[in-house]
């Protein structure tokens, strides 16, 4: 049985090929361990996007026929996933990943309809490591799949019926098939904050889930499941053998356990890997930061979100602007580049709180900062309970749920907030983005990374 996996195209991101999909690599590893013939396709080779109209073109003649096609998608990518699925010459087509998971398991029956998943036969919720393997096993023996945990199928009237998923034991999953990631065969050198790094920047995870409860986040309160150190060592050595020079640790809160993360830093460093990771201000111990600086840390991203104490409270972030300031300073003092992840447009935002974020950035002067426009993505508390935030879920198709930064207009704002007009929010977004370009060393990944 031939299985092809791919992430949906990332045409909206700078240097789309840079963003290796760790989940897809895990699935490929699990299928390969079970003896399946599996490849990972490059979504950017089978599609192109017109920059002016934003329209996707698919190239069916470049799509290899297969028995099972598995596509991953976040919410703003899902329409592209559908376009690909509709033309790919595969016997069975399956959608998985964040969008599939949160729509299938969340409230809002109106979105659990075939028309939102055009081209797909099945929708899989949760972690696919075991589910996809069992699905392919059964398919290859012409057995029924309908009762599989995590599987979603469509009734005749188009309703999506989903079985609750099982959580996998992360200490038992197969290692990601890093070697099958297509872009590994065409490495490029880029410069990140002054350091030359071989692309792709490969993602690894040493734990899944997060115990915190930020209201804009689909991962809120999912607990923490740690991968064994032996697995991390094995994966780091595999990457070293593949010639990879830098990794992006995808753990939601890498520094949650100081002893553990310092040990992992040593493992990555010993394998010759520079690394980036994400964390939050209340988990930035000075000793840990110094240790990171000595062990190959290229950059730490901090979920700062806002410069307004009120907004951080509304988001249930559990940090304050002062804590975020101290954490940014701590990283810089330890000699670590720090990227402040900022978000505007969460319910409660006003013109005044936007200005507080600008002032925070001016004072903190992080090495880099990224700016997102909040979208009520499936999975987050605003999606689950819009009424608690005084908002209605937008009618706009999912592909519009995307913040456009400098080019954004009020038509690109999909959520109506009681506290700020669409026009003021779009203008605030543009102005803050422009200000960041001028006053922060670099606004986001796009401007700090140059291909050399
Ligand atoms: C790292 C990361 C990124 C990176 C890399 C993305 C990538 N290519 O993987 C970057 C910075 C590029 C990124 C960008 C974005 N991201 Co992001 N990202 C993450 C993060 C923090 C970790 C992803 C990860 O590696 N997880 C670990 C792996 C092992 O898990 P996984 O990918 O989920 O895969 C497992 C399952 O989902 C499932 N699965 C996945 N795909 C498939 C496919 C099939 C067929 C099957 C059966 C199963 C399956 O099985 C996998 C193995 O268990 C997640 C949060 C999270 N914890 O997942 C957010 C997350 C996925 N991102 C999110 C969003 C919104 C985005 C953006 C849209 C943000 C934006 N507006 O710019 C963009 C879109 C990216 C794009 N390609 O266009 C949301 C998605 C919410 C939603 N409803 O869709 C998440 C969940 C964050 C959140 N907490 O809300 N992201
Ligand atoms: S934003 Fe980060 S810290 Fe907050 S719940 Fe999500 S993953 Fe956890």
Image (cartoon, rainbow, N blue to C red):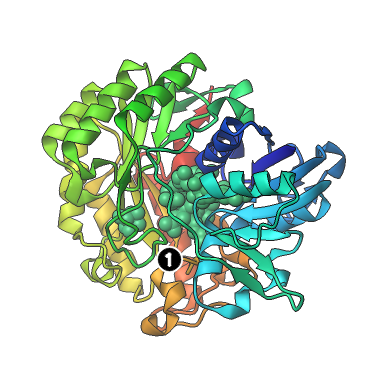
Q: Is mark 1 within 8 Å of ligand 1?
A: no
Q: Quadrant of the C terminus?
A: top right
In the picture as drawn, the residue positioned furthest to the right comes out as 61
Mark 1 burial class by Cα count in 10 Å: few <14, some 14-19, many 20+: some
Q: Is residue 318 left or right of residue 182?
A: left
Q: Quadrant of residue 109?
A: bottom right
Secondary structure under tag 1 reads helix
Residue at the spot x=60%, y=31% of the render? Answer: 32
Eyeballing the image, is 241 above or below 125? Answer: above
Q: Quadrant of the N terminus?
A: top right
Q: Is residue 49 left or right of residue 445?
A: right
Q: Is residue 405 visible?
A: no
- Which residue is label 1 attached to? 428
x, y percent for residue 136: 67, 45
x, y percent for residue 216: 38, 65
Residue at the spot x=39%, y=25% of the render? Answer: 194
* Viewer-closest of 204 and 361: 204
x, y percent for residue 425: 45, 70
x, y percent for residue 439: 35, 46
């Amino acid at each position: 049985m031939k299985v092809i996996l791919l992430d949906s195209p990332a045409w909206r991101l700078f240097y789309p090929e840079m963003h290796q999909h760790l989940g897809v690599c895990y699935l490929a590893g699990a299928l390969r361990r079970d003896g399946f013939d599996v490849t990972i396709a490059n979504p950017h080779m089978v599609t192109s996007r017109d920059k002016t109209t934003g329209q996707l073109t698919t190239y069916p003649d470049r799509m290899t026929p297969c028995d099972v096609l598995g596509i991953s998608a976040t919410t703003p990518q899902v329409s592209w996933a559908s376009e690909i699925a509709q033309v790919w010459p595969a016997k069975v087509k399956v959608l998985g990943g964040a969008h599939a998971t949160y729509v299938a398991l969340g409230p809002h029956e109106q979105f659990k309809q075939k028309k939102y998943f055009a081209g797909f036969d099945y929708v899989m919720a949760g972690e696919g490591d075991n589910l996809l393997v069992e699905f392919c096993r059964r398919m290859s023996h012409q057995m029924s799949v309908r009762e599989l945990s995590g599987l979603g199928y469509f009734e005749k009237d188009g309703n999506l019926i989903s079985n609750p998923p099982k959580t996998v034991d992360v200490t038992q999953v197969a290692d990601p098939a890093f070697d099958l990631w297509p872009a590994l065969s065409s490495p490029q050198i880029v410069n990140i904050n002054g350091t030359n790094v071989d692309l792709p920047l490969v993602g690894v995870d040493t734990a899944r889930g997060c115990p915190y409860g930020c209201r804009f986040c689909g991962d809120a309160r999912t607990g923490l499941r740690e991968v064994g150190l032996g697995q991390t060592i094995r994966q780091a050595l595999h990457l070293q053998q593949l010639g990879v020079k830098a990794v992006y640790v995808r753990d939601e809160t890498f520094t949650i356990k100081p002893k553990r993360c310092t040990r992992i830093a040593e493992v990555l460093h010993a394998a010759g890997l520079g690394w980036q990771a994400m964390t939050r201000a209340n988990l930035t111990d000075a000793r840990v930061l110094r240790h990171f600086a000595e062990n190959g840390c290229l950059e730490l991203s901090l979920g700062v979100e806002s410069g307004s104490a009120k907004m951080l409270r509304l988001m249930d972030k559990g940090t304050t602007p002062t804590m975020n300031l101290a954490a940014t300073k701590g990283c810089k003092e330890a000699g670590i580049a720090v990227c402040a992840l900022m978000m505007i447009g969460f319910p409660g935002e006003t013109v005044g709180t936007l200005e507080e974020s600008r002032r925070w950035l001016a004072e903190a002067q992080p090495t880099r900062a990224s700016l997102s426009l909040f979208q009520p993505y499936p999975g987050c508390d605003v999606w689950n309970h819009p009424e608690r935030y005084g908002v209605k879920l937008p009618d706009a198709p999912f592909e519009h749920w995307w913040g456009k930064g400098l080019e954004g207009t009020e038509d690109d704002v999909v959520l109506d907030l009681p506290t700020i007009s669409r026009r003021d929010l779009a203008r605030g977004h543009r102005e803050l983005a422009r200000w960041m370009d001028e006053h922060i060393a670099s606004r986001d990944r796009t401007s700090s990374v140059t291909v050399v």
